[in-house]
Each structure stands twice: as C-alpha cells, then as structure tokens.
Image (cartoon, rainbow, N blue to C red):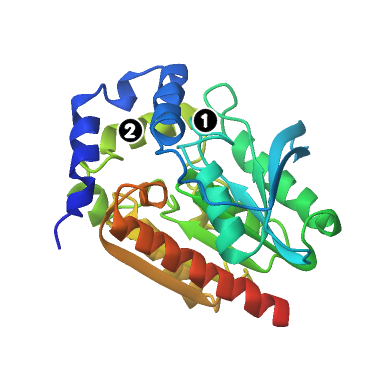
Amino acid sequence: MPVDPSLSGLLEAIAAGTPMSALSPADARAVFRMMTVDGRPPGTLPAVGTVEDDKVAGAEGPLAARVYRPEGAGPFPTVVLLHGGGWVIGDLDTHAAMARTICAGAEAVVVAVDYRLAPESRFPAAAEDAIAAVRDVRARREEYGGTDVVAVAGDSAGGNLCAVATQHVPGLAAQLLVYPATDVLGDYASRTENAHGYFLDEATMGWFIGSYATPETDLLDPRLSPLRGELAGLPPAVVVTAEFDPLRDEGVAYADALAAAGVHVEQTTYPGLIHGFFDMGPWSPACQAAIDDTVGRFAALLSSAGRG
C-alpha cells in the first residue's frame, strides 16, 4: 500500500530541510527536539499518575532518569525505556510521549534512561550504560513497580540497546522492540527500497553509525549488532516494524531469529507507516492505531509474565 497520506506533509517538510547528516550533533539534537517536543500539539501527551526525576547506575557513573507511574496503587510491572536517536540524538524529553504511552497503556512504571550519546561517548558506551541501567533497575524493582516483572522497551537505537541488554541481564520478563536496529553489516532489501524519502534515510543511518562506532569497532560485535548474539533463553518479545522503513527487514530478521531460538515472539509490520511512527499519532490516525496495537500487545505480554 502507499505511504499513509496523513504523513505527506511531514515528509515534505523533512525533505525541504537540511539533511540531518549535514548537521552537527548539537544542531541535530535541537532539530529533533523541535520535532518531538516543541512541535507536538498541546494536550496530546497521555496522562499518567506521577512523573519524577531519578538517577540510575550507568557503566561509568550515575545516569539521569525519569520515572513515570500510572494511576492507582499498584503493584505494577517495571519497564526500562531506552530512547531512540541513532545513539547520537534523543533524550528524556524527546521520548516523554513514548514513556507516557507505555506507562498509561500497559499500566507499568516506566523508568526512562538518559544514556551517554555519541560522538562524545562512542561505542560501547551506550550499550554498557544500557546494560548497567537495566541491571540496576531490576535490582531495585521493589522501589519502582514492586513486582518481579521487569521488562525493557525502546525504539530504533533504543530497540537496539534493549536487545543488547536482554542478552546481558538475566531475569527480564519481556522486551518491546520498536523498529530496532539489529545488524549493522546485514544486507537487507528494505535498506535499498526505503533508502530515501521516508524520514530515516541512508545518509542519516551512515552518519549515526559513523558517529557511534570507531574505526576499531567490530561491527559484528553483538553489543552493536545483537542479531549476532546468543538468543536462546531471552525473554518473550513484541517486535514491530514499519513498511517504509530502511530498518524493516533487520527487525523482522531479529524476530525470526528469536523465534528460531525458541523465544516467544509477536512480530508485526504496519503497512503504510514510516520510521518514527510511534511519535506521529497526533498527525496520523494510522500511526495512532499502530501505537495502540503495539502497547496492547506489550501490555498482554507483561500481564502474562505477571501471572507466570
């Protein structure tokens, strides 16, 4: 099917602007913030019970975090949210909508983590921060949701970091991977089919990986390409992708590999949508429907883990 018509104005505006790959990291972060925070229609952030700032452990010191609690007394599952942005852009503010959506829709305490970004902190800094933060939150789960159900959720590079964390932190109950980057050196048709004109493009992906990886980085390292890691015994997963996303096929490949390793997986590719759809609900009913469906699937997975 064609790209969702509701997204045409957004895509035209992106095409008319300066490519992200031509910006400095600071300018790219400012543009991304303008799109996700300043440009979001007022009153569209989902309501939650409380929001408070916190600190969680990182690989080389404390990391800023933000804790979202749903309405009600609990206890609740706890979800560590790792934001997307190619390991270069994104922060607690740019992903507040995602955190609130999961908190309210899945009735979970969401702990959003502000891990170190590239190029100031290059590989494996973000991966090591993700592992340390998830390990810390799981150890302190009584302070957060109060149950033994601890899960991870993330989009794009955040999905990558969630996949990495599950391979290093035992005892997690579930994972939500939203259009995750999983295999840097893989050869996938979606990277060619969707290389230009759909928000995330080939040049930007190259800029992201070039900012995060060093010349010495092994691009097959599972901390960068989790598809190359050991997948048996990992927690059940919801993996969602978008039809017009260069990362589509590697997300599907990761879901397939999880299933082949004996992991319970629910994989969905939403037709007509693009990379970043999880933040595009205010402009696109189709994106909002995909968001609701994704969170509903994740909520069911958390509920099942709680009963198990």
Give coordinates of residue 134: x percent, y percent.
Answer: 71, 51
Residue drawn at point x = 42 percent, y = 18 percent: 27
Q: Secondary structure at mark 1?
A: loop
Residue 9 left/right relative to 97: left
Give coordinates of residue 242: x percent, y percent.
Answer: 31, 57
Mark 1 or 2, nearer chain start: 2
Give coordinates of residue 144: x percent, y percent.
Answer: 79, 55
Q: Are marks 1 and 2 in contact (CB under 8 Å)?
A: no
Residue 236 visible from this viewpoint: no
Residue drawn at point x = 71 percent, y = 76 percent: 306
Residue at the limit of the structure toward the front, as seen here: 43
Residue in the foreground of this view, choosing between 98 and 220:
98
Give coordinates of residue 236: x percent, y percent.
Answer: 58, 72
Disc assigned to residue 204: 2
Residue drawn at point x = 41 percent, y = 52 percent: 278
Disc assigned to residue 216: 1
> In the rendered structure, which amino acid carries the disc numbered 1?
Glu
> Which one is in front in this view, the residue at disc 1 or the one at disc 2?
2
* Vertical position of residue 215 compared to residue 198: above or below: above
Quarter of the figure with the C terminus: bottom right
Residue 204 visible from this viewpoint: yes
| Total numbered circles | 2
Residue 198 left/right relative to 280: left
> In the rendered structure, which amino acid carries the disc numbered 2?
Thr
Characterize the local packing of mark 1: few (<14), some (14-19) or many (20 or more) Cα atoms within 10 angstroms.
few
Residue 117 left/right relative to 168: left
Residue in the foreground of this view, choosing between 200 and 74:
74
State the CA–CA distance, disc 1 to disc 2. Answer: 21 Å
Residue in the foreground of this view, choosing between 287 and 45:
45
Residue in the foreground of this view, choosing between 109 and 241:
109
